[in-house]
Image (cartoon, coloured by chain):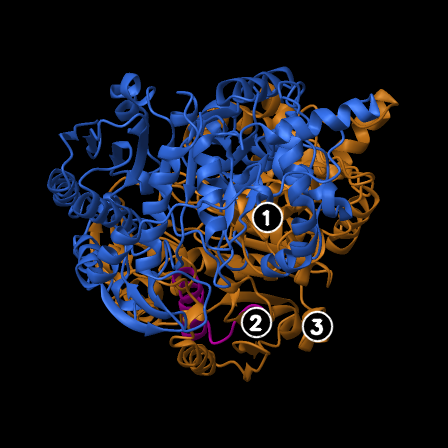
Chain colours: A orange, B blue
Amino acid sequence: MLKNWMGAAATIVLLLAAKPVFAAGFSAADVPAYAGEHSGVYAHIEANSEAHLQALQRWVRQRSISAQNDGVAEMAAMLAGDLEALGFSEVAVVPSAGHPGVWGYYDAGAEKTLVVYMMYDVQPVNEADWQSPPFAAEVIEHKHGQVLMGRAATNQKGPQRAFLNALDSIRTVEGELPVNLMVLAEGEEELGSPNFPEIVANYADRLKTADGVIFPFNSQSPAGDVSMFLGVKGIVYFELEANGERSGGPKAAEIHGSYKAVADAPVWRLVQALASLTSPDGNTIAVPGYYDPIEEPTEEERWVFEGTVPGWTQREAAMQEGLAVDGWIDGMEGRESLERYVFGTTLNIDGIWGGYTGEGVKTILPHKAVAKVDSRLVPGQTPDHALSLIRSHLDVSGFEDVIVRELSGYPAAQTSIDAPLVQATIGVFRKRDITPDVTVRLAGSAPYYLFTDLGLPMVASGLGLGGGAHAPNEFMVIEPLPGSRVAGLVEVEKFYVDLLYALAAAEN
Amino acid sequence: MLKNWMGAAATIVLLLAAKPVFAAGFSAADVPAYAGEHSGVYAHIEANSEAHLQALQRWVRQRSISAQNDGVAEMAAMLAGDLEALGFSEVAVVPSAGHPGVWGYYDAGAEKTLVVYMMYDVQPVNEADWQSPPFAAEVIEHKHGQVLMGRAATNQKGPQRAFLNALDSIRTVEGELPVNLMVLAEGEEELGSPNFPEIVANYADRLKTADGVIFPFNSQSPAGDVSMFLGVKGIVYFELEANGERSGGPKAAEIHGSYKAVADAPVWRLVQALASLTSPDGNTIAVPGYYDPIEEPTEEERWVFEGTVPGWTQREAAMQEGLAVDGWIDGMEGRESLERYVFGTTLNIDGIWGGYTGEGVKTILPHKAVAKVDSRLVPGQTPDHALSLIRSHLDVSGFEDVIVRELSGYPAAQTSIDAPLVQATIGVFRKRDITPDVTVRLAGSAPYYLFTDLGLPMVASGLGLGGGAHAPNEFMVIEPLPGSRVAGLVEVEKFYVDLLYALAAAEN
């Protein structure tokens, strides 16, 4: 299957003697279904479904709220212990400036090596909001069938432990795994992964030798469909602050609003500085050179993009309804809006505050105002460069007094549709009569550059359905309703079995 | 003393054959001290100081928190009962859309009539923050001497009941008051006086026949100095709001920040609309015509202004230190900054908020953002006109989607230095060797237009020292420290005795 799209593209180029035209675009339906059958392993999974479910419950019951340092060390130890029990020859709890990582290496003596990215921390909970206690990990009846309810049921303990269950069955039945594994887990994903770069750097030389990275993920929609993305945008997230110390006006605290007659106002400075960053409609970034480093989409990206235009166009109205948005910017639709969504950088105000925000009338001149701003970065952009352009623009525009404070930043990440891991994943879905909707990239951000910058393709995917991440009543489907296309836990685990074998068999 | 400054000014004009120059400006020291002595009344006040103090305590002990409707009706009844006991021939509790007003008319058969504006409501309290309970009205030792501590001790029950005590002693000793009185009290001053215009309107025809309005006030500084102001600025206070319903973007709730690629952002619209209202430094209003209706200061105002330049210039550094402001706008000082402070309109952001305002990183596109904005109005400006200019400017600039929501608005108020009530007040201070610092107007706002628009001069002044209004440990000095220039309760009451007689004796 390797490079088949390149051949197609080259043919068209030859025929038209012009720049490539991708009339059809990539279609996952053209990827052959994975043909392997691993009946003995499947049977073991089925026979041990109760024990496998209990392994998920054991993980969910172990609290690991990173923001509150609640159970984090215990969960790191539990993960490390599980890897040892599964025959990983190297297992280490990896200290960092924050919560530790966990490293494990499983030597199968195989040709290929798969990195498994994991997160073992969870979001905080408000227990009163849950219909079943968040750390009870009960199996309850639900509109999607029998589900495991609990914090991290789907984000991310459920799919991750299902992946390990699959390993257990392969080893028990076949004696050995088809690929070597490197597990690298962090305990601060819900905090924005502040120390994961350091943890990755410790193992960079080992990781580079692998063939790809998987992040086990419940990717199915309630209808059973699957979306896959080949990339993510980067981000630079920063605060802009104006205060009396730097901008004039009150330095220590608010003063009476009548002093505006003679005193400078930091809030006005923040507003004016922000306004200088965009067009009046807020949709075009007015910082000189901001768009310049953006790389043109590659031929491959355009080809994959073309394949997604019809689906986007079809789903567009429903998406807007779900978001309670009457329409996109300037009435864009179809190809045009998808172009902006996939290939566009952004500048967004996440929050802004200063002064009196209560009911009614209070007349003060605030001493400080802050805005939280993020810019989604596409290939070619870097956080440092983007932020330096913003800083320079503010300086040149006379806003030297306005503080720019970076809170987070990392570049985009991209994986090729050609990568054996990607093709294997699609093939394993195709075996199940699922044709994943493969998109160039999420408009959202994740620090997958940590792996892709090491030259590794990365896939965050899997069978399975979950919901309620970062919310009450989080769940993962264990046993779907009759006739549903959603996979239950047994089928989720079989998917990961197939994926390991498919990757092992893939041409490089 | 009438029109004496006009004569001086005319002389200078004649000499220079040019526009008036006020080299010296008004000086309260040129106003003759009030010469009357009312020994019998003073003696009665001294002899009854304990009972008079108890009258203040009785008022403070009666809770009347308007925001919580706590004791309001009882306090209105107490005030009405006190007026009846003092011989007011008409007393009425006046219904309104909110808490009632109180009206009282005292017919002394006198030539002159004084309106007494009162507020009988108080600010809420947090009892735990008080060193003496806020409604115990205890007399305690304090750095300023013996003080009455309690909510409304100085804002405004203390000075108001002291004024009534003075009436009581005059009537007891002399048999009659030297002036007729109209008391008009409200129970919603701490709520922004929403229904006081309606209450004033009920009595407008009666009020118009009076000679002036006094608001009894503890005007002394801890050093014993007194400031008087002849006017107040008006205000228009409004919210600007951008939301998805009108500006595009999400209508119901925040959405994921990555959708900025295709979705409009209400926060940007608010920021851009606000930014269109001022120069980049936030100090010049960019709304066309905004400054046009402002009236040139009158000759009288300039003359009074001149008299205040030296004091302002002297106090300027200390004021800035108190406000924690390094300097005024563009380094203005002295006459220039005082001009802006007294004669300038403003546009001030009191508060702004939208989206995520907590710690760290959260990537959302908020569906709504709001700013609270106020403009201080000087003579010539009206709230309706100011707001219509802002609305028109937003519309012409393409911000029809941004909502302008008025919360409060009233015009400036001004009293002439010539008014017999003003001259009488200064003369009564001068009798006590106090030369009040008389300023053209406060830079702050109060709805005194309700009275001045009826043609009445208005004075908010009196002897006495208080502190802690709107805060814990509110107090009024009852017995000052030995050697202090601050007046105790007995001297405060004697001041009001003299003031009534001085007004009665003043030429019209």
Residue beneath disc 2: A184
Closer to the camera in the image, A36 or B39: B39
Amino acid, disc 3: Ala
Residue beneath disc 1: A371
Give the magenta range: A158-183
Residue beneath disc 3: A204
Amino acid, disc 1: Ala
Image quadrant where residue B275 sits: top right
Give the percent coordinates (x, y) of residue A244: 65, 55
| Label 2 neighbour load within 10 Å: few <14, some 14-19, many 20+ | many
Which of the two labelled residues, at mark 1 and mark 3, occupies the earlier sequence position?
3
Q: CA–CA distance between discs 1 and 3? A: 36 Å
Which of the two labelled residues, at mark 2 and mark 3, occupies the earlier sequence position?
2
Amino acid, disc 2: Leu
Which of the two labelled residues, at mark 2 and mark 1, occupies the earlier sequence position?
2
Residue B157 visible to an observer of this rendering: yes
Magenta span: predominant SS is helix
Badge 3: chain ID? A
Q: Is residue A264 left or right of residue B63?
A: right
Give the percent coordinates (x, y) of residue B49: 22, 61
Mark 2 and mark 1 in contact? Answer it, CB < 8 Å: no
Specify the quadrant that holds the C terminus of chain B. top left
Tell me what residue is drawn at x 32 percent, y 43 percent.
Answer: B190
Specify the quadrant that holds the N terminus of chain B. top right
Q: Is residue B168 left or right of residue A246?
A: left
